[in-house]
Image: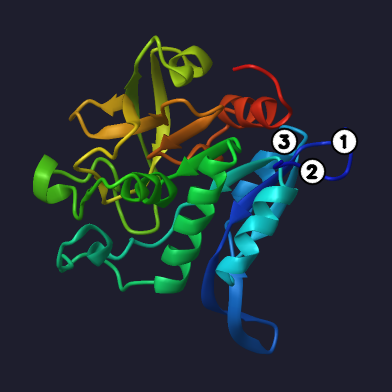
């Protein structure tokens, strides 16, 4: 059974990280990296963040058994070969270790009915796991850069949510969100339901049918001030009904 082994204390929320070269003090080393905004978002809702860097796939079962909930964080583009396409000229270089580990982690979380929130790249990974595909460069399709105003910057736009969805009940029918992505869902994966859309009809949120709390959002709630999505994840991780 998935979940913390530490009794009835705060929920343990695993958060996936990147592996990238980094510099600190006199060191230049490969490091497990995650924006601190993720940690603060989890701490703000009185849960305990646990970093999960890409590692051996044998570790997946241990992670899923020990944590109460999972955040699959944003980051670099997924390898287009995972959905049978050549890379677009604006698609970033592949990261096979992270891709393989996070897809295995998501699969195990789904099998264990572990509550999860997949953010940005995480939502895209969820879609690929369910045999969906991606738009590799949104400006080619929507004709603008509203979803990613400039490299390294976070913009904002409105998202319309289905009133009958879990997300609609949590956030209301319309929400303004922090955004930073140049890719998005093209073919929706099996068992996923689109429940949120930008004004240009780009899919901004999905839910996994039949899962206790299986939510993907294309935006970056950790960069905003609204805690409700993380509160809902922690409630589900603590066994509450959503």
Cα gap from disc 2 to disc 3, whole angstroms: 19 Å
Give coordinates of residue 145: x percent, y percent.
21, 46
The correct choice, above or below, for 28 with respect to 56 in the image is below
Residue assigned mark 1: 9
Give coordinates of residue 132: x percent, y percent.
25, 45
Q: Nearer the viewer, mark 1 or mark 2?
A: 2
Q: Nearer the viewer, mark 3 or mark 1?
A: 1
Q: Earlier in the sequence, mark 2 or mark 3?
A: 2
Q: Nearer the viewer, residue 199 or 202?
A: 202
The correct choice, above or below, for 191 with respect to 38 in the image is above
Question: Is label 2 in a helix, a strand or a loop?
Answer: loop
> At 71% across and 46% down in the image, what residue appears?
67
Residue assigned mark 2: 4
> At 69% across and 89% down in the image, what residue appears?
26
Residues at circles 1 and 2 in contact by the CB criterion of under 8 Å: yes
The answer to whether one can see residue 179 in this image is yes
Residues at circles 2 and 3 in contact by the CB criterion of under 8 Å: no
Q: Nearer the viewer, mark 2 or mark 3?
A: 2
Residue assigned mark 3: 44
Q: Earlier in the sequence, mark 3 or mark 1?
A: 1
The correct choice, above or below, for 127 with respect to 56 in the image is above
Quadrant into which the N terminus falls? top right
7 lies left or right of 94 = right
Quadrant into which the C terminus falls? top right
The label on residue 199 is none
Give coordinates of residue 82: x percent, y percent.
28, 62
């Amino acid at each position: 059974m998935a979940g913390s082994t530490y009794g009835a204390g705060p929920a343990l929320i695993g958060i996936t990280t990147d592996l990238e070269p980094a510099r600190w003090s006199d060191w230049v080393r490969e490091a497990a990296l995650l924006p601190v905004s993720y940690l603060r978002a989890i701490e703000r809702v009185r849960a305990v963040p646990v970093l999960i860097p890409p590692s051996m796939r044998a570790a997946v079962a241990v992670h899923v058994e020990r944590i109460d909930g999972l955040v699959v964080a944003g980051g670099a583009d997924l390898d287009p070969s995972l959905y049978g396409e050549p890379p677009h000229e604006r698609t970033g270089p592949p990261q096979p270790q992270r891709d393989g580990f996070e897809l295995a982690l998501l699969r195990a979380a789904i099998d264990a009915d572990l509550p999860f929130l997949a953010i940005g790249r995480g939502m895209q990974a969820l879609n690929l796991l369910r045999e969906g595909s991606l738009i590799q460069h949104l400006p080619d399709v929507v004709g603008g850069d509203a979803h990613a105003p400039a490299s390294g910057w976070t913009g904002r736009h409105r998202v319309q949510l289905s009133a009958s969805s879990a997300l609609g009940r949590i956030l209301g029918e319309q929400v303004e969100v922090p955004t930073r992505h140049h890719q998005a869902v093209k073919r929706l994966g099996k068992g996923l339901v689109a429940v949120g859309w930008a004004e240009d009809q780009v899919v901004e949120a999905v839910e996994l049918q039949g899962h206790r709390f299986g939510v993907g959002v294309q935006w970056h709630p950790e960069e905003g001030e609204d805690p409700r999505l993380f509160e809902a994840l922690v409630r589900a991780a603590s066994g509450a009904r959503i």
